[in-house]
Image: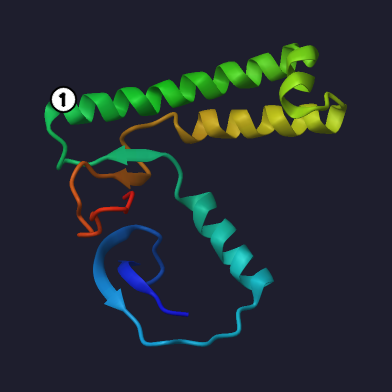
Amino acid sequence: MVSKGPLQYAKAGSTQIIGSVLYSSNLLSATVDGVAASKVFKAYHAKVKRQAVQGDCSAPQASATSEAINTCAKLAAEAASAAESDDEKLAEYSKDADSSTHSTVVSVFNAAASEYSSTSSGAPYYCSDVYDACEPGVIA
């Protein structure tokens, strides 16, 4: 495989991203322990919750971004409530309304609502291209 793009880094023992560097590898081959990689991924994302709108945003950008994040939280909470109380709608969208599906769907929407409940802490949202990754055909 070949890897190219920004590489984020944190201080040792921390999950707080403090910067990035551009990286382009030679052709690499590797053996990946999928179970261990999955555990690390899940542990990291369990700690990095919510969103933090960064200071590089103009007032209108920060306002629009915060409003979008808050709307996501509201919609996720409404979806959890609807899934919890409307089995017919749940079956329409998920093709099933059994207790397991019901519990899973409600849990996922509640988790999303919680994830989007803050715009001042958590994963950074930038309004500028801090990783110098934007180019035609790239969504950053």
- Seen as rendered, the residue at the extreme left is 58
Q: How many marks?
A: 1
Viewer-side residue, 11 vs 137 = 137
For residue 97, side relative to residue 29 (left or right):
right
Provide residue 130's location: percent of width, then percent of height: 20, 55
Viewer-side residue, 125 vs 49 = 125
* Residue at left offset 70%, top offset 30%: 105
Q: Quadrant of residue 7?
A: bottom left
* Residue at left offset 58%, top offset 57%: 42
Whether residue 32 is visible here, answered yes or no, is yes
Which class describes the residues within 10 Å of circle 1: few (<14), some (14-19), or many (20+)? Answer: few
Viewer-side residue, 87 vs 36 = 87
What type is the residue that disc 1 sits on? Pro
For residue 11, side relative to residue 117 (left or right):
left
- Residue designated by label 1: 60
Which of the colour schemes (rainbow, by chain, secondary structure, one colour) is used? Answer: rainbow
Provide residue 84's location: percent of width, then percent of height: 73, 18
Provide residue 18's location: percent of width, then percent of height: 26, 61
- Seen as rendered, the residue at the extreme front is 136
* Residue at left offset 54%, top offset 33%: 112
Answer above or below: position of 55 versus 37.
Answer: above
* Residue at left offset 79%, top offset 15%: 87
For residue 91, side relative to residue 74 (left or right):
right
Whether residue 11 is visible here, answered yes or no, is no
Answer above or below: position of 81 versus 13.
Answer: above
Q: Quadrant of residue 21?
A: bottom left
Viewer-side residue, 42 vs 6 = 6
